[in-house]
Image (cartoon, rainbow, N blue to C red):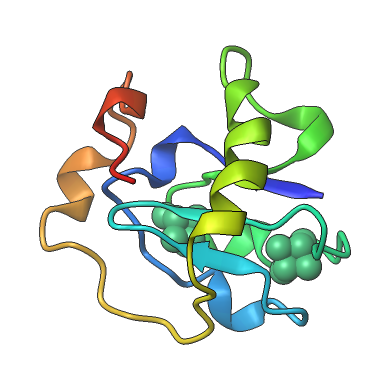
Amino acid sequence: PFVVTENCIKCKHTDCVEVCPVDCFHEGPNFLVIDPDECIDCTLCEPECPVNAIFPEDDVPAGQEAFVALNAELAKAWPVLTVRKDPPADAGEWDGKPDKLPLLER
Ligand code: SF4
Ligand code: F3S
């Protein structure tokens, strides 16, 4: 499956959700995750993310391996999102900021 990684935190552009043919994106307060049990590896979402936060499970950036389990866990807790919504007003300021994981809201 594909995995949403750290750079989505506080960016949350949501362009990814509308292309997913199996509606497997789930929304939390400041981050989205992909349900690995539903993702069919179609690859459509990966180029849609303006901050390049989506990767195949086998290719997540070094140091971000924890996001594989985090997507699986949070997908079970959060509701599905299928329609794009406006990103946070300050999304641009958070693109590329390191160490955003402690800022993840559940
Ligand atoms: Fe959805 Fe395809 Fe992205 Fe998987 S790879 S989350 S099926 S758009
Ligand atoms: Fe996050 Fe990128 Fe989707 S910022 S909400 S993975 S478009």
The percent position of residue 55, horizontal first and vertical second, equals 68, 42
Residue at 81% x, 65% y is 38
* Residue 74 vertical position relative to residue 98 in the rendered view, above or below: below
Left or right of 43 on screen, residue 60: left
The percent position of residue 58, horizontal first and vertical second, equals 83, 30
Left or right of 66 on screen, residue 105: left
The percent position of residue 34, horizontal first and vertical second, equals 64, 56
* Residue 4 vertical position relative to residue 34 in the rendered view, above or below: above
Residue 103, image quadrant:
top left
Residue at 55% x, 74% y is 17
On the question of residue 67 being in view, the answer is yes
* Residue 55 vertical position relative to residue 61 in the rendered view, above or below: below
Q: Nearer the viewer, residue 69 or 47?
A: 69
Number of numbered markers: 0
Left or right of 54 on screen, residue 79: left
Residue 56, image quadrant:
top right
Q: Residue furthest left?
A: 89
Residue at 29% x, 57% y is 29
Q: Residue furthest bottom?
A: 83
Q: Residue furthest top?
A: 63
Residue at 57% x, 12% y is 63
* Residue 33 vertical position relative to residue 64 in the rendered view, above or below: below
On the question of residue 44 being in view, the answer is no
